[in-house]
Image: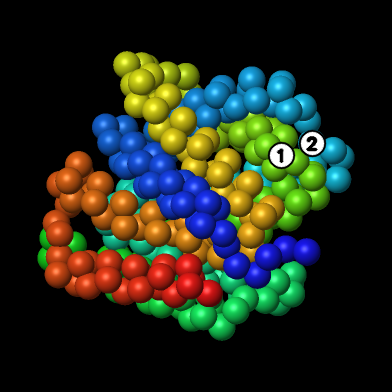
């Protein structure tokens, strides 16, 4: 029977995954159009996962419908996130996309999976989402978030919730989260690069030349981040893993300020305090 909470080692691992997730999203905002960088990162993650897929073997047939659904949801996620990043700063888009997902995931888990949470854990998720919303809607450089950027960010959040649930259930159906994760990354390395080549043509290959190292680094971070999350969802409730992973907004804020030189606002600092309060409540549950 699945534990109702999250052990300290699992909690620490998911926090590390959150840091890695913020890192690869920062790579997606550097130098190239986001969709091109994401295609490069996706291909790199698949390359890194290939030896693991050979080692662990393919997951059983019961997991493949979940894998297929996840790959479709991930493709939509990449496209929606890239469009959101084209219309707004990372410091605004990232919190909305990541922060709306755990609340949707918790509701879906309760309604569809009957995976109930302790009251304190549920309160922690709600507090975390409130802090993320406060961070997201703060003014950035005097500019409010456009409706287009907001729409793509919310769509991204819905897709995150979708693939989180699908992969949590898929890894459980596989009986081996490592075989499932390896197969997911290997197969997922194909659709987005293929989509980019189909829509942009071979000329995009010249654009990514010289960015091999950032692409490999982003791929390694993406691989580590979501691999940990898939494993965690087999040993802890999916809503708690999803919510804890979204502490990545804290790391993303630091990266956006220190690396991307986006403005640091008082409202965002207040949001940090609220998010930390939510994380503490979840951990104490």
Q: Quadrant of residue 94?
A: bottom left
Q: Quadrant of residue 204?
A: top left
Q: Position of residue 173 (x, y in %)?
A: 80, 50
Q: Helix, strand, or loop for circle 1?
A: helix
- Are the residues tagged 2 and 1 within 8 Å (C-beta)? yes
Q: Residue shown at 32%/16% (left/top)?
A: 210
Judged left or right of residue 11, residue 91 is: left
The residue closer to the viewer here, 90 or 247, is 247
The residue closer to the viewer here, 121 or 250, is 121
Q: Residue shown at 60%/27% (left/top)?
A: 49
Graded by Cα atoms within 10 Å as few (under 14), some (14 to 19) or many (20 or more), the crowding at tag 1 reads: many
Residue tagged 1: 180
Residue found at the very far right of the displayed protein: 61
Residue 72 visible? The answer is no
Graded by Cα atoms within 10 Å as few (under 14), some (14 to 19) or many (20 or more), the crowding at tag 2 reads: many
Q: Which quadrant, please, contains the N terminus?
A: bottom right
| 102 is higher (above) or lower (below) than 114 | above
Residue found at the very far bottom of the displayed protein: 119
> Gap between marks 2 and 1, in whole Å?
6 Å
Judged left or right of residue 74, residue 127 is: left
| 208 is higher (above) or lower (below) than 63 | above
Q: Position of residue 246 (x, y in %)?
A: 44, 59
Residue tagged 2: 59
Q: Residue shown at 50%/64% (left/top)?
A: 243
Q: Quadrant of residue 195?
A: top right
């Amino acid at each position: 029977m699945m534990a109702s909470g999250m052990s300290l080692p699992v909690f620490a691992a998911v926090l590390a995954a959150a840091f890695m997730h913020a890192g690869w999203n920062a790579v997606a905002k550097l130098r190239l159009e986001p969709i091109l960088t994401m295609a490069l990162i996706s291909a790199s993650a698949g390359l890194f996962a290939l030896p693991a897929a050979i080692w662990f073997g393919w997951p059983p047939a019961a997991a493949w419908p979940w894998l297929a659904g996840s790959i479709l949801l991930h493709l939509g996620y990449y496209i929606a996130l890239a469009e959101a990043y084209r219309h707004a700063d990372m410091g605004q888009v990232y919190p909305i996309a990541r922060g709306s997902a755990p609340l949707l995931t918790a509701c879906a888990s309760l309604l569809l999976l009957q995976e109930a949470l302790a009251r304190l854990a549920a309160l922690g998720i709600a507090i975390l989402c409130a802090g993320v919303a406060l961070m997201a809607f703060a003014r950035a450089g005097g500019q409010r978030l456009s409706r287009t950027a907001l729409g793509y960010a919310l769509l991204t959040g819905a897709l995150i919730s979708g693939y989180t649930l699908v992969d949590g259930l898929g890894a459980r159906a596989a009986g081996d989260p490592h075989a499932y994760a390896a197969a997911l990354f290997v197969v997922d390395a194909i659709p987005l690069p293929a989509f980019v080549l189909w829509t942009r043509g071979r000329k995009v290959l010249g654009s990514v030349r010289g960015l091999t190292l950032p692409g490999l680094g982003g791929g390694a971070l993406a691989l580590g981040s979501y691999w940990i999350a898939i494993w965690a969802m087999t040993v802890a409730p999916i809503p708690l893993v999803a919510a804890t992973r979204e502490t990545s907004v804290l790391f993303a804020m630091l990266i956006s300020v220190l690396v991307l030189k986006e403005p640091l606002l008082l409202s965002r600092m207040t949001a940090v305090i609220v998010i930390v309060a939510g994380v503490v409540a979840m951990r104490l549950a």
